[in-house]
Image (cartoon, rainbow, N blue to C red):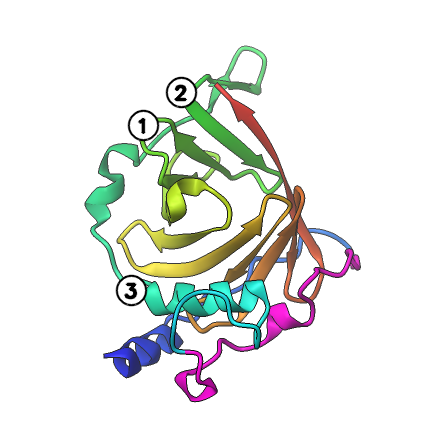
Amino acid sequence: MKKIFAAFLFLLVSTSVAVAADDFVPPVPKDSPDYLAPVPSEDDEVTKSGPNTKFSVVTQMRYDAFQNAQITVSPQYAEDKKNVKIFVADTDNNVMKSVKVPNAKITKYSDGTYSIKFKDTPDSVFFYELSGDLTGFGIITNKGKLPYVIYHYDTEGTITAIEICPERSRSYTYGPDGLIKEYRLDDNFYNSKNKLIKKRKTVWF
């Protein structure tokens, strides 16, 4: 079963986000260059969950995350969150105005997208385009308490990425193929070539 799962993951290679900034070399992550290493296999004799001195925290978390990943989940999971607007057009002044979303934590990104965590679903996060249309959702482990993992799915419920969050100031996002797509240091996101691609700002309503 694990071999079938691994083969399926390699077929689900996701494309990287386009670079939106000039070359920029950020601070080296604590686990670098380990965060670029492939996921350990069973041949490495790391078949149990939990800490292992052979690997760093991030590598061990990623190994466990891939072992526990669900390839698909029901799209009904986000059925009532398909369109949530945080901006509306003010045609009189030709600008976009913010709209409050009650009991929600909204994270705005510099590429125009945003994500929302609702208080009534603390184990989930929903991702949106500027128009308010849902682009995907994430399922959060450990009730969102550090360290935790976010499994990213598209609107059809197929896995697109696995995000490892070892601490508040950083996270690492991998494609289903096990290769890094982007990582975050504080509020800045970088691609696998260490180029700044977006920033974030979080607010509560």
* Mark carried by residue 25: none
Image coords of residue 15 (percent x, y): 50, 65
Q: Mark 2 points at which residue?
A: 103
Q: Residue furthest bottom?
A: 43
Q: Distance between the residues labelled 1 and 3?
A: 25 Å
- Residue nearest the viewer, comparing 24 with 52: 52
- Residue nearest the viewer, comparing 85 with 153: 153
Kind of element beneath mark 1: loop
Q: Name the residue under label 1.
A: 120
Image coords of residue 28 (percent x, y): 76, 61
- Residue nearest the viewer, comparing 42 with 112: 42
Looking at the image, is mark 1 or mark 3 earlier in the sequence? Answer: 3
Instruction: Determine whether 58 is above or below 79 in the image.
Output: below
Looking at the image, is mark 3 or mark 2 earlier in the sequence? Answer: 3
Residue flagged by tag 3: what amino acid is it?
Ile
Image coords of residue 22 (percent x, y): 78, 55
Instruction: Determine whether 113 is above or below 41 in the image.
Output: above
Which residues are drawn in magenta?
A: 23-46
Image coords of residue 145 (percent x, y): 46, 42
Q: Name the residue under label 3.
A: 71
State yes or no: residue 39 in magenta: yes
Instruction: Determine whether 170 is above or below 82 in the image.
Output: below
**Residue at position x 31%, y 27% in the image:** 120
**Residue at position x 34%, y 78% in the image:** 6
Q: Nearer the viewer, mark 1 or mark 3?
A: 1
Image marks 1 and 2: residues in contact by CB distance under 8 Å: yes
Binning the other alpha carbons within 10 Å of mark 3 as few (below 14), some (14 to 19) or many (20 upward) gives some
**Residue at position x 79%, y 57% in the image:** 24
